[in-house]
Image (cartoon, helix red, strand yellow):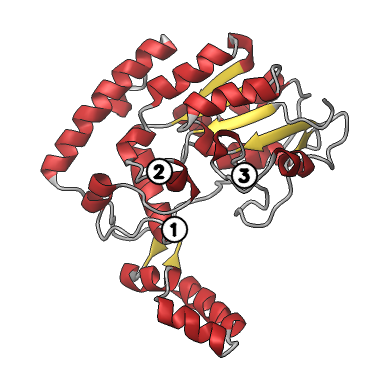
Amino acid sequence: MNHLPSLFIVGSLKAGTTALATYLSKNPQFYFPPGTFQQWGKMEPNYFASINPCISKEDYLQYFSGMRADQIGVDSSPWYLFFAEKSSWEIREFNPSAKIIIMLRRPIEVIKSLYAELSFHGMDTNRSFDEALAYGIHNGAASRRHNGPILYQDIVNWAPQVNHYMNQFSEDHLKIILFDDFAVTTENVFEDTLRFAGAESYDVCNFNAINTRKYVLFPSVNRILRNPPTFIKRLARVTKAKPVCEAFRQRIICLITSTKKRPDRTVISENNMRRLKEIIYKQNKDLEVVLKRPLPARWYD
């Protein structure tokens, strides 16, 4: 049991999970699987619910082999919430004493932020926000696990997702954090999370913004760079110039990327916005029933 993760940050996407995980990773009482492909230098295993089918149970356990007996192992994989029906049951079977953290945010902010991030990384190739809402996410391990595109409005349909975890874990093993509270009283929420996890108080010193939104100056160029045409990939392999091409590609991506706020590309038509608000309104009402508490008024704006 010493090398089993016992704290799971299961989602939602774009609701502060990376920030919370980053703050916890500064505390030596917690152990995160090392990795390099995430911005904050840690791994999101995505093992449960077979989101990443390439990872075996042995592989997963190996990720935590460096954990000390007195540390709390953490698996932070925000896609677990979307696949809650299966992941909640699998996590409980894996470690019945596991503790679950769910973070939720105003749905329209999650949708816009997720679309911007996936577009930046070339995982959403829709040419407009209207198209993205209509056709969903086609690329990535999650959509492959879903056996088809994932609609953004389904990602924020949290009532059934949260309910699955409530059915599997007792109240003292399940913590739900609203991003509104996390953003305003970060230190208090962090200390409360430490107590929930069974860790001692720890001074992080600062709570800098993590995983802030990036803006692409030339979206069409970014799409080509993120998903180069097949003939260019073949040419790079044949000429053995792949390392040079990759370095050049990354350099161009840096040049067309900015963290300074740019004109909002998540513009949506009036009719689609009205329909989206109707969907979100019903989902919020369902979530209030599950949580047995009212949501912030701005979630309905």
Quarter of the C terminus within the rendering: top left
Q: Which residue is mark 1?
A: 214
Residue at 59% over, 34% down: 48
Left or right: 86 with respect to 300?
right
Q: Which residue is mark 2?
A: 147
Q: Residue furthest bottom?
A: 239
What's under tag 3, amino acid-wise? Glu
Q: Position of residue 32 (x, y in %)?
A: 73, 41
Residue at 62% over, 44% down: 44
Mark 1 or mark 2: whose residue is earlier in sequence: 2
Left or right: 257 with respect to 128?
right
Mark 1 touching mark 2, by CB under 8 A? no
Q: Which residue is mark 3?
A: 44
Left or right: 216 with respect to 278?
right
Give the foreground label among 3 and 2: 2
Residue 260 appears in the picture as rendered? no
Instruction: Looking at the picture, tell me which residue is in the foreground, 182 or 158.
Output: 158
Mark 3 or mark 1: whose residue is earlier in sequence: 3
Give the foreground label among 1 and 2: 2
What's under tag 2, amino acid-wise? Asn
Q: Secondary structure at mark 3?
A: loop
Residue at 56% over, 31% down: 10
> Few, some or many C-alpha atoms within 10 Å of disc 3 (few <14, some 14-19, many ≥20)?
many
When the figure is inspected, residue 22 is found, relative to residue 301, above or below; the finding is below
What's under tag 1, amino acid-wise? Lys
Mark 3 touching mark 2, by CB under 8 A? no
Identify the image quadrant of residue 68: top right
Q: CA distance from mark 3 to mark 1?
A: 20 Å
Mark 3 or mark 2: whose residue is earlier in sequence: 3
